[in-house]
Amino acid sequence: MGYAFILPNMLGILLFFILPALFSFGLMFTDYQFSNPNVSFTGLDNFRRLFHDEQFYGAIRHTAIFLLSVPVSLVLAFATALVLNRSVYLKGLLRGMFFLPYVSSGVAVAFVWMLLFQPTNGPINEILRGIGVASPPGWFADPDTAMYAIDVVQIWFMLGYNMIIYLAALQEISPEQLEAARIDGARTRTITWRIVWPLVSPTTFLLLVTGLIMTMKSFALIQAITQGGPGSSTTILSLYVYKTAFSYYEMGYASTISWFLFAVIMAVTVVQWIGQKRWVHY
Amino acid sequence: MSDSAGNPKVKLPATIAMLVAGVFMILPFLWMISTSFQTPSEVFVRWLPSRLDWSNHVRIWTGSYSFVSYYLNSLKVSVIGTIGAVFMSSLAAYGFARIEFKGRDALFLVYLSMMMIPPQVIFVPKFILFNWMHIYNTHWALILPGMFSIFGVFMLRQFFMGVPKEITESAFIDGAGHFKIFSRLNLPLAKPALATFAIIDFSWQWNDYENALVFLTSPKLYTIPLGLQNFILENNVDYNGMMAAASAAILPMIAIFLIGQKYIIQGISSSAVKG
């Protein structure tokens, strides 16, 4: 009986997720190219190539910089949620303002930020010049700053999502617990860091892990703003997979890179399973 | 904390500080709307347009890159995909939550493990599969996979598990089968959860850029994210037109958020805190 309910869904998941995943695993050991019908098994050749691929190492570095956006947005989100939770008027309006970037269309906001960060006369650099910065950064146009400018957009994008979840976690904390600490003479700062922060640590941990995974998987924002450039300075791993498969049509090699990405995500997930028990203070 | 928190002397400055921060958060949207009403000579020079210039918006909706067709394409893909996903996911979620059968938990674990697979892993096989199915470069390449949501099964399963068993047990005694109990008792109860999932899934499909990028090549099939990109690649100095186009893409999402705010926020908070 149970199968009747699950079957329609299971067939779809099998066809569009499970079988492609298994097939991709096999492709990893081939030299499959879209234009070339002759596919041969090449064993571990793709892995050897991977270890000598400068672009691949670059993509790892860029991914690492991209991932910096996760902890930064968490800290900002926690601070925002703390203030919004108790000590403001207009809570609903403020919550909506912070959350708006997350619900808007990712590609569309990418283009807005492209103009805001425009180096020669975009508004951000105009303001920087106005406050006396003689030569403001080139942002997306400069290989040294492009990845950090992407981080700014990503932090802005994710802040509201993280804040909403922190708000939900803060509401679970019983007021009595905080009251008891206050009566014992604890100061607000002590309460925040010694009581509230440990109490929301499961949430922080969950947001950190899911944030890292989500950030590693997504490349829409970067593809829309820089297409991985200038040069390859913003080509993160997930974007490198896409480019290898659909710009260079090296689909076997692309599968190899994509499974490396999977291995990293898997590792983060395993750390989550272990860490949940060890590092999270309830 | 509660003493100082309720105190207007703390609350008022905190509210003002947060309002300033909040305005910074929505400043890109304000700048976008303002620029979409400016003339080319005003971009980057003025914060507000000297007068409302509607020509940029007219150009978006009537020009050679008509957003009318992008909108219709996006609507078609997201509406059919979301309806399919709600239907398929709620059925499967009920099966996983309420019916005991052999291999159920193992199967659910397979579902969960699929969530770890990055979409990049399956792009190439899907590309080959869609070519073989003759749906590459058609809307079905987005709609069909869109109907199968692992997140939807996961989220709705949580909900069905929370429905008290007593409600359905008496129906069982009266001889009703699972299909009847599902459609007459569980689905009506699940309305808020279904609405939450539908809104979140719709917004994902509406904003989906990566799949459209890989599986659509004909401009006449473009959904809004691709149409927007196409417009920008071919008109890269038409800043006013770009911002009018971006507004056209974003405003429906903002409208949906304002209408469904309660469901979206509840859905996001509950899926994370309980999960």
Image (cartoon, coloured by chain):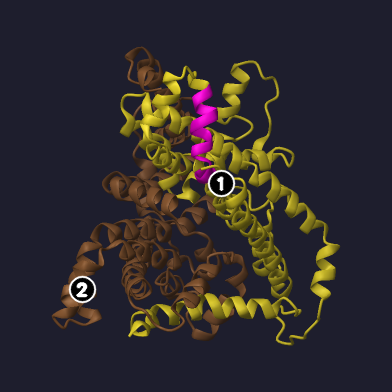
Chain colours: A yellow, B brown
Is residue A202 shown in magenta?
Answer: yes
Determine the residue located farthest toward the top in the rendered image. Answer: B9
- Whether residue A65 sits left or right of residue A177 in the image: it is right
Mark sitting on residue A51 = none
Which residue is nearer to you in this view: B145 or A214?
A214
- Amino acid type of the residue that numbered disc 2 sits on in the rendered structure: Glu
Mark 1 is on which residue type? Phe
Mark identifier at residue A205: 1
Do the residues bearing badges 1 and 2 touch, measured as CB atoms within 8 Å?
no
- Mark 1 is surrounded, within 10 Å at the Cα level, by few (under 14), some (14 to 19) or many (20 or more) other residues, namely some
Q: Position of residue B16 (x, y in %)?
A: 39, 19
Where's residue A231, x and y in %?
74, 50
Residue tagged 2: B169
Residue sitting at 39 percent across and 72 percent down? B147
Q: Which residues are magenta?
A: A190-205
Residue A9 figure quarter: bottom left
Nearer to us in this view, B159 or B242: B159
How far apart marks 1 and 2 lie (CA) works out to 39 Å
